[in-house]
Every structure is written in C-alpha cells, then in structure tokens.
C-alpha cells in the first residue's frame, strides 16, 4: 500500500496492490482505520486506487472486502493517520 500514512484531513490518493481484490467498484468496500472509503477511482483484481477519507489520528487496520471473490483481505496496523499541526 502506498502511502501507508496520511494526514487526518484525507483527500489524497492511496494505492493497494494484491491478489483477488475486487472485480469492479460496486462490489467491494474498503476501510481505513474503521472508516469507509467513499471514492474509489480504479479497480482491478490486483490493484485499487482510492481517495483516503478524513479520519482520527492513530494507527489501524486496512480491509478490502469483495462480494464476488468472497474474501476479505487486509492487515492490522497498516495505516496511520497523523495530526495536522500549526507552527506559529
């Protein structure tokens, strides 16, 4: 997965590579740290590209669930949201 972390504001491209991920966008769901991904740009059985949603600071799991392939794949502690800090 690239990147493996991002700011809590979300809105950036994330790419996941693997096997038997999804057949098409409407049949799969993606979760980052328990938050559903809304915008999926590109789908194949070996790669997903999506927009990271906004989230809370911390490290958590990444899951891709496919209704066609009948599997859920992912991993624990694979994604980290970091805070946005203002230096004055």
Image (spheres, rainbow, N blue to C red):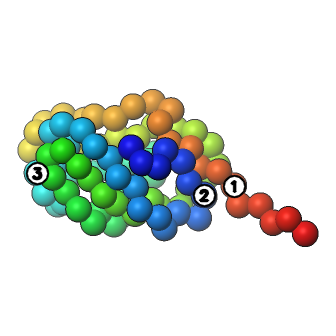
Q: Are marks 1 and 3 in contact (CB under 8 Å)?
A: no
* Label 1 crowd bin: few (<14), some (14–19), many (20+), radius 10 Å: some
Q: Residue furthest top?
A: 76
Task: Classify mark 2: helix, strand or loop.
Answer: strand
Q: CA distance from mark 1 to mark 3?
A: 34 Å
Q: Which x, y percent locates residue 1?
A: 39, 43
Rendered image: mark on residue 7: 2
Q: Is residue 50 left or right of residue 55?
A: left
First in sequence, mark 1 or 3: give its number.
3
Q: Residue at x 30, y 58 (%)?
A: 49
Q: Quadrant of residue 6?
A: bottom right
Q: Residue at x 40, y 55 (%)?
A: 14
The quarter of the rendered structure image containing the C terminus is: bottom right
Question: Does residue 67 appear anywhere in the picture?
Answer: no
* Mark 2 nearby-residue class (10 Å; few <14, some 14–19, many ≥20): some
Q: Are marks 1 and 2 in contact (CB under 8 Å)?
A: yes
Above or below, 51 against 3 in this view is: below
Quickly name the residue at label 1: 83
Any part of residue 85 in sight:
yes
Q: Is residue 83 left or right of residue 87?
A: left
**Given the current orientation, which residue lies at the most extreme front position?**
2
Q: Residue at x 19, y 57 (%)?
A: 43
Q: Position of residue 44 (x, y in %)?
A: 15, 52
Marker disc for residue 23: 3
Report the residue that reaches farthest toward the right.
88
Q: Return the x and y of residue 38 as percentages of the image width and height.
A: 35, 64
Q: CA distance from mark 1 to mark 2?
A: 6 Å
- Picture layout, residue 76 above or below residue 11: above
Q: What residue is rendered at 60% in x and 58% in y?
A: 8
Nearest to the observer: residue 74 or residue 88 = 88
């Amino acid at each position: 997965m690239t990147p493996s972390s991002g700011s809590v504001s979300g809105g950036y491209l994330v790419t996941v590579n693997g096997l038997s991920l999804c057949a098409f966008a409407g049949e799969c769901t993606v979760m980052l740290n328990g938050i559903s991904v809304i915008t999926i740009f590109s789908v194949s059985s070996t790669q997903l590209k999506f927009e990271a949603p906004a989230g809370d600071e911390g490290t958590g799991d990444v899951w891709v669930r496919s209704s066609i392939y009948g599997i859920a794949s992912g991993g624990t502690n694979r994604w980290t949201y970091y805070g946005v800090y203002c230096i004055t």
